[in-house]
Amino acid sequence: MENRRLLYLILISVLLAVYYLLLGINIQHAGYYNHEALFYIEKAHIIFDGNGSRLKIIGLTAPILPFYGILPFSFNNLLAPVIASAIGTAILFLIIAIIIIKTTNDKYFLLILLILFTFHPGIIFTACSGKGIYFSLIFFFLFFYNIFRFYQSNTTFHISIASILLVALIFCDYRFVWITLFFIPLIVSIAIQSLNLSEKQSIFRMFLSFNNPSLRRKLANKTFAIYVIIFILPLISIICYKILNQTHANDFNYFNDNPYATWNVLIDKLEIRALPVVNNYSIPEVSFLTSIRIIVYCPLILLGIFLFRSNVQYFLTVTIPFALVEFIKIKYGNSFLNQQYYLIFIFMSFLAIIFNSRIISNNIVYKALILVLIIFQIYMGYNYLNNSFIESEKSFISTIKKTNNGDNAYDEYIDLASVINHLPTNSEILVDDANAYPIVAFVKDIQMLTLPYQDAFLSAIENPSKYVDYVLVTSLTNNVSGYTQLNYKYKNIIETRNNTKMTRVYESYNWILYKIIP
Amino acid sequence: MVSTIMNDPIPVHEILINDQLITLYDLEKIRNFSKRSGISFIKIALTYGYISRKNYESSLIKAGYLFAENVRIEAIDSTIINKLDLKFTSNFFALPLRIENNKVVTLMADPTDYEFINYIYDIYGLDADVRLASDLDITWMSHKLLGGPFVKASVFNLMKSDPANSALVTFSPTQLSLMFITIAAIIIFLFLSFVYTSIVLNVIISSFFLISILFKLFLALLGSRFELHEAVTREEVRNIVDEDLPIYTIHLPVYKEDKLIKKLIWNLQSLDYPREKLDIKLLIEEDDDKTLNAVKDLNFPAIFDVIVVPFHMPKTKPKACNYGLHFSRGKYLTIYDAEDIPDTDQLKKVIAHFAKLPSNYICIQCSLNYFNRNENFLTRMFTLEYSYWFDYLLPGLDTLDLPIPLGGTSNHFKLDKLVELGGWDPFNVTEDADLGVRAYAKGYKVSIVNSTTYEEANNETFNWIRQRSRWIKGYMQTYLVHMRDPVRLYKKLGLKGFLGFNFFIGATPLTFLIYPLLLALFICFVIFDFAFIRTLFPNWVLFMSIFNLLIGNVLMIYINMVAVFKRRYYELILFSLANPVYWLLHSISAYKGLFQLIVKPFYWEKTNHGLSKINNTVDEKP
């Protein structure tokens, strides 16, 4: 019986993956792209088709797991991220569904899960955009699932698995490392609960354990031990990763700060900076209001908090993501929150539902309320994406609705790549993929390009006429021209210093392609 | 030497009652037990905790008896001796030596034991000329004179019955050929292309390092799922009826452990098991007068039977245990070291667990841990290591149904099955690990029970290295023995068991051997930034080996950290960070073990016990 149910779930997951894939391919054909996916496409393109030392790209491209996620599908470069995210999201569905059938026999929970995964715009965005959000969501869900399981089983197994999952989560999105801060009160609470005291009330247990020297020592030791066992692995992994960055890129933070290693550096400038829309007052994303926005986006979380109200540990655990998101909002105040920081609450609320499935199964009111809230959430998911301050999210909906009036920022990259693709055979083009990766992603033959991962790149910059036939530089209007030497000043410098002539072959709003005339 | 028997002597038991050393109730109990077991009165009185040897001696001297001295240099008539059965005579603490004045000169610990005096008459047709002697001297003489065939059997039994599993031959010709061919091939390839060969070696070694640690992490995580599982509950132990319990043999192999004898008795007395159903054997080597004298000088009753193991090479613990097997009466058998403190209900838990398991389970391993964990850095690290080994890795192996390398002590066997397996391999210095694999290969299973024996953690570095080098050498021996014919082993263990054996028994010493190489490479590259490293290895190789070394170390640290939870040794968690340093000690031991494997494979590196200054009380149990 169990195997049969599992088989059905796998079948549904496969159908979901196909559904996402079809949607994703259609949306991409309609012209939807995003920087994250293009960044991964470009790096995968280099790994499989490039020529030169690709170690840094293989080992230090970040976030590393979403990047590795697309590699198996690189047989079709442009579609690889979409295939990965479609399959990844279907796997997320399968994981949750398996946990549901292990926890309860009530099919209602599977039904609402299926509704959510089929219709929620945020989840569809996750599955069809080609972004690596699905990876973060999988590990976020599993991390908290194991934390909850730890409360039930009290075995090191679940807490160790949670720790390993947190490592994976951090390597999907580095910002999740801050979650470690907000576990401190929770772990104190866990340690107090686990002390062998006759007193049942948390507050009195705390009072007793703080005022007895022996208990206090035990409490301190246990709190520290649990904290260490959850967080040492992520922290040491980051240190190890930083050492690898230092030994191979001479920069401990290469993976996080360098535009060659991560798409996040430029994206802050290109997409999600808050400044250009500071006058937009429609539910502004500022500090404590973020939590309100989250509750509006995912009211089911309130039900989760309500269901866990009598248990301090569970209650604190559910509230941790709020603290995390508020912290991220303060720490990275200049940028808007990505969709994934909203979506995590959907999965957290689902966890709360799963762990209270026995109460919910016996109460029709709860069931009805959950259904209503799910439908409301689906609408809010659409609403948030439609009004998102982040271009890649907003354009996802506008592409589906075909309301972007043919105004697509990615057309410029495609056009430029097309020009490069049509250059004479054996032409060599000097390109800096720090900011030109969206163009490189569309180039068919990457061997034509001289890129920074190759040893010849620095020499080619200094003496282009000896190494390349063309140079792609940023125009004066390009927002991110500061990240590369190949900018609008380059032409004058080279022409003056090297006595070389550069003639304009193609020019767009942000880019200029020059031909080198020795 | 003069006869010590008096005319119409008062029976010894009456002397003892008169001196209030035993009561009438004790006498009744001893007699009943003697009838049931065939063991003489004096042996029961002296080895089942009724009277101390000191008191016995003074009581008999007071009654006018004289103890013979220097019995070891007594003249022996081999025709008299050869008629004896050691197993029978050892029940009486008596030994006929020669015929003198038409009487059989007989050493006896109880000069009024008429059963044995009559036996002498029956055998030799002459009266006995009884000479009172210490039971320990008689035991020493008996085993020295009559133990030859038994000790030979202890050494050569396995070699004769199952030569393929005997470690007498360390490297088989095929293994030697393979090793030399491999070394030669590496050297040739190094000459042909130094860089590429170094790269290949580096990649293989560092990947192997990471994979073997990942396997350990996997096992530890698997084991951690069941950390709260109780194979036997307290309720089940309470429900056991003492009268239904079988005889339980305990082997205590010791060598020069004179300081620990008193502690040993104290620990054994705490065992919750009917005393008459315990068959405790203190196995003392023939040349170990220190321990023998310590037993002789005890001023309180002993609860064990001394067995003197006659001299025969190799002088190893498994040989002593095999020898003890010949005199063991129990249905079950376990081994403890002299300093061990088993949980008081351990034997009952084992019996309850055996009762629940299918019949092919022939051994149950208890956890080992340390009572002196907070003594110094070494004991802390050792405690962490034992905690993850016994609390997480072995249960992980158990869950996966892989061969379990038994721990040095506290492994409880079904005695008949142990004999069927051929006992321990006397040429293997980790005979326990070897036995675990042999049992698995014959289709038998080993299980784990939730009971702990607390030992003394080695607190002295050189002593630690000695002990560890023996263990690692033993793992190498075990690996070599069972890999003489990998195909046969694969057929016996199946794929899962074969891989488990290779990754657990084979990989453990190898990981320690390669660790310093990887560390040296890391230090040369990252800290000193030697140019030749970059010339020799391309970036991807360096990236990979650093990644493997770092992640491997992180995971080992993590496994150590996990280990503190089951036993609530939270204060040790930060010491896990020192695991890379601790591993260097392992590496030193591994190289020492490797060297010894080649030059003296059967040499038993003696671990000194009793060095701890901590009182061996178990202050906190899970």
Image (cartoon, coloured by chain):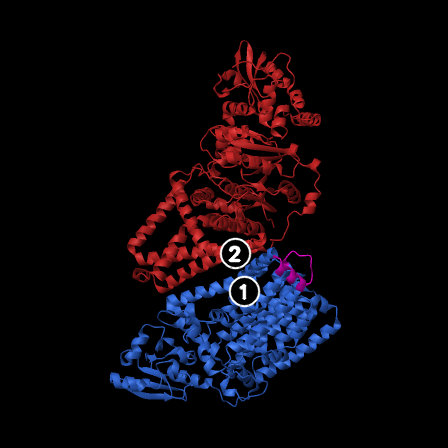
Q: What is the x, y in percent for residue A424?
A: 33, 82
Q: Quarter of the image for the N terminus of chain A: give it.
A: bottom right
Residue A165 numbered mark, or none: 1
Judge the density around disc 2: few (<14), some (14-19), many (≥20) Cα neighbours within 10 Å. Answer: many
Which chain is home to disc 2?
B
Residue A197 is one of the magenta-drawn residues:
yes
B299 vs B372, nearest the viewer:
B299
Which chain is home to disc 1?
A
Q: Which chain is blue?
A: A
Q: Nearer the viewer, mark 1 or mark 2?
A: 2
Q: Is residue B485 left or right of residue B62?
A: left
* Residue holding disc 2: B573
Q: Amino acid at mark 1?
A: Leu
Say if mark 1 contacts mark 2, CB within 8 Å.
Answer: no
Q: Give the image quarter of residue B412.
A: top right
Q: What is the x, y in percent for residue B170?
A: 42, 39
Query: Residue furthest toward the left?
Result: A499
Q: What is the x, y in percent for residue B49?
A: 62, 31
Which residues fall within the magenta stretch? A194-212
Q: Chain B takes which shade in the image?
A: red
In the displayed structure, would residue A425 be above or below residue B59? Answer: below
Q: Amino acid at mark 2?
A: Ile
Residue A324 is one of the magenta-drawn residues:
no
User: Judging from the image, what secondary structure is the residue with disc 2 in?
Assistant: helix
B241 vs A104, nearest the viewer:
B241
User: Judging from the image, what secondary structure is the residue with disc 1 in?
Assistant: helix
Judge the density around disc 1: few (<14), some (14-19), many (≥20) Cα neighbours within 10 Å. Answer: many
| Residue A443 visible | no
